[in-house]
Image (cartoon, rainbow, N blue to C red):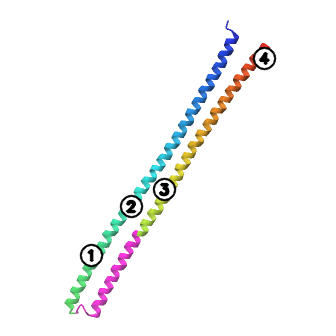
Amino acid sequence: MCNPVAIGIIGLAASVGGGLLSAKATANKAQSDQNYYNHLADVAESNITEVRQSAEYDRKSISDTTARETQANLTQTKQIMGSQVAASAANGTGLGSVTSADIMRDTLNKYSLDEMFIRFNADTQKYLITKKENADAKNLAEQARGYRAGGESARAAGNLQVAAGLLSTAGQVANSYYNYKTRRGN
């Protein structure tokens, strides 16, 4: 037969060992959860960089397009003015006449308005891109902060579970010892 004291000691040791293993597993899970949330936060923060780079690329693209459009507008205006000069000369109207000067001034005014609209539209597009960039970056930063807080919370909850598990194990061991002592009458 087995010695009841030995069985009791083995039971207590198994209970303590199980409690310690459970505590270690819970602590590892809490650390793993925190690492996962930190990874999600890192991804969100990395996405901020991508949002900023994409917006910068879009703004540069708009600037390049604006430069091409204003150059094309200038070229077209010069061609129109050249045609106007040729037409004035062919009609016998000198360049110094009031009519020719009015036509040239009107053409230059239209060129200036066209250029102003091209630049205004480009500035509006850039503003909207920047506004969206800032909103997206802010949302991603908030998301990263939330993930980090979630990781801290998971870690803290895991630590509390470890402590609760160890206290429960200690209570079980104390209860087993008390029952053993009570049965023996000591």
Residue tagged by mark 1? 75
Indicate the position of residue 119 as horizontal and vertical percent values. 38, 72
- The amino acid at mark 1 is Thr
Residue 34 placement (x, y as % from top left): 54, 40
The front one of 103 and 25 is 25
For the residue carrying disc 1, how many other residues have a C-alpha within 10 Å: few (<14), some (14-19), or many (20+)?
Answer: few
Which residue in the rendered view is the most extreme toward the top?
A: 1
Q: Quadrant of residue 108?
A: bottom left
Sequence-first tag of 1 and 3: 1
Say which residue label 2 marks. 58
Residue 111 drawn at (x, y percent): 33, 79
Q: Amino acid at mark 3?
A: Ala
Apparent side of residue 16 relative to residue 94 in the rendered image (left or right): right
Of the two numbered discs 3 and 4 in the rendering, the one whose residue sits closer to the viewer = 4
Going from N to C along the chain, the mark reached first, 2 or 1, is: 2
Tag 4 secondary structure: helix
Q: Which residue is mark 3?
A: 137
Mark 1–mark 3 Cα distance, whole angstroms, equals 40 Å
Sequence-first disc among 2 and 4: 2
Give the Cα distance between marks 4 and 1. Answer: 106 Å
Give yes or no for residue 167 being in the magenta stretch: no
Which image quadrant: the N terminus?
Answer: top right
* Residue 23 shown left or right of residue 129 in the figure: right
Taking the view exactly as shown, the residue that stands out farthest to the front is 186
Earlier residue among tags 2 and 3: 2
Q: CA distance from mark 2 to mark 3?
A: 16 Å
Foreground of the two, 186 or 42: 186
174 lies left or right of 104: right
Q: Which residue position holds label 4?
A: 182
Q: Which residues are magenta?
A: 93-122
Quarter in which the C terminus is drawn: top right
